Image (cartoon, rainbow, N blue to C red):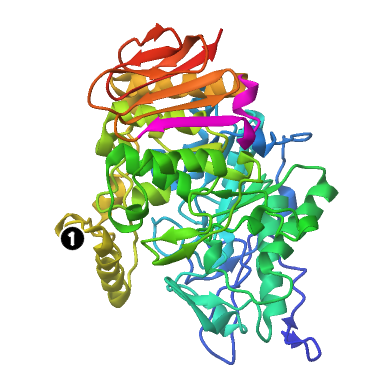
Amino acid sequence: MAPDGSTGWWSANIAGSPPGTDYAFLLDGGEPLPDPRSPWQPAGPHETSRTVDHASFSWTDHGWQAPPLSSAVIYELHIGTFSPEGTFAGAQARLDHLVDLGVTHVELMPVQEFPGEWGWGYDGVDLYAPHHTYGCPDDLRRLVDACHARGLAVLLDVVYNHLGPSGNYLSRFGPYFSNHYHTPWGEAVNLDEAGSGEVRRFLCGNALMWLRDYHFDGLRLDAVHQIYDASARHFLEQMAAEVAELSAQSGRHLVVIAESDLNNPRLVTPREAGGYGLDAQWSDDFHHALHGVLTGEHTGYYADFGKLADVAKSLESNYVFDGRYSAFRRRDHGRPAGHLPGWRFIGCLQNHDQVGNRAKGDRISAQAGIARAKIGAALVFCSPFVPLLFQGEEFAASAPFQYFTQHHETELKQAVSEGRKREFAPFGWNQEEIPDPQDPQTFYRCKLDWSEVARQPHAGMLEWYRGLIQLRRSTPELCDGRLGGITVRFDEERAWLTMVRGRIVVAVNLGATAQSLPIPFAASLRLWSESDPRILERAVHLAADSVAILEGC
């Protein structure tokens, strides 16, 4: 390779090498290293890279257009545990289930190359290459193409705040990491120091590659609160602008969604109004508030939640913590976001973090029971937020979702296992019950058991979710995202809550006995859980731990 002037770049002409050629880099006579922009690592992150012709795939999705995010129902899945095969092809074989369920968007947890045969994917090291055990690059394209053929948009979870420790050779090639910042997972990416221009180009180019060459319809950015950038133009603003430009050039609706615990509405405020211009963000406050009242858990970050008042504030104002004091953080947290529509926020009862980051990886149906899981689902799908559900949630899957890895370095294996126990210390969970992430059985027990969908209580839960999704998609006031049109009333002592959105009323009884809940107008039943409710004069009589959705007469 030859240096390109004084820019720091080196290049070589390999025009005679066909697609499928293996190659590596030698730096200063050292050992062979994979390409930081490798499109495929067929033998894993430590081995040689392989060239790929992105233009050779025969797409069939010409004219495809993703539904607007404001009307979306998102289904998050993990390729390795979603199907028995744990591959892109295995996931493709289950798409008809998602179509029948009624979701509009499939969100893949990270599929970028990471060490080992299995893992969550948040320790990726070759950001341009699909994980080798899931399939080849064209297998991923076939999955996306098949989704589009069935009317399903596809989102990809990407990680730009850090890289994994094993197989991470990026620092050998330039100033990709910063000594001024640190993340809980290791070195922070250099986005505002010397040489950061090329680092930003590396990451923005990666985002555009997934959208352009793999036809993804959007990206979910992991933990953007751990992306540190003091530049005048923040990295997130730059990425959002470049994705918007690609959207305009291609004529496709492309979106960028952030995960953040900052409670800062600037993330999803349009760039013209001084924001970063991201399309939406995950709503941790809504999840935590809902989880707290359904399970009664008040440890760790759940210490800030647990009252129906928190659920009500989230539904009416987006954030619970909008500048008020957080006992968990021991400081004021957030700022108001009630001026933004609800569809700028993704609401959920479960996701990979809130299930997987538990000692046993147990789901809400195992923690609080089927009845309360149905209540939580009803509030999610009738909320002003874009609803998201996590794989298996729709049929109350018995399989947990635990944290699993397959590292081969002795020190790293020990560090991961011990670090997992330290992470759970604030929650007071029994450390002896925490599965070892390195135990292969921790991974295998997380695979969904698809035979459950035909048995009770799983079949009943599946019908509940189908009904909720159909209701949301057929009822205009449930999709408008207008916070001003929401009225929430509750009684903490009697443990009931009602939410009114136009002519729709959601009535929830979390009390220990049956009771009558006031509603503002005469209504008829649309959906209900457990025993049949009784409609009274401007009231509904509900059994304990049940929910009814009514429509005004």
Whether 342 is among the magenta residues is: no
Residue under pointer 1: 431
Q: Residue at x 57, y 69 (%)?
A: 227
Residue 278 in view in this figure? yes
Q: Residue at x 63, y 65 (%)?
A: 21
Q: Which is nearer the eye, 437 or 325?
A: 325
Q: Where does residue 2 sit, x and y in percent of width and height?
A: 75, 87
Q: Where does residue 25 sit, x and y in percent of width and height?
A: 60, 79
Q: Amino acid at mark 1?
A: Gln
Q: Within the image, what quadrant is residue 411 found in?
A: bottom left
**SS at mark 1 in the image:** helix
Q: Which is nearer the eye, 295 or 442?
A: 295
Whether 488 is among the magenta residues is: yes
Q: Which is nearer the eye, 547 or 219?
A: 547
Q: Where does residue 335 sit, x and y in percent of width and height?
A: 57, 58
For the residue carrying disc 1, how many other residues have a C-alpha within 10 Å: few (<14), some (14-19), or many (20+)? Answer: some
Q: Residue at x 71, y 67 (%)?
A: 17
Q: Quadrant of the C terminus?
A: top right
In the shown orientation, is residue 177 left or right of residue 465? right
Q: Residue at x 63, y 45 (%)?
A: 344
> Magenta segment range?
475-491
Q: Is residue 230 above or below residue 342?
A: below
Q: Quadrant of the N terminus?
A: bottom right
In the shown orientation, is residue 131 left or right of residue 141? left
Q: Is residue 216 above or below residue 14?
A: above
Residue 350 in view in this figure? no
Q: Where does residue 32 sit, x and y in percent of width and height?
A: 53, 80
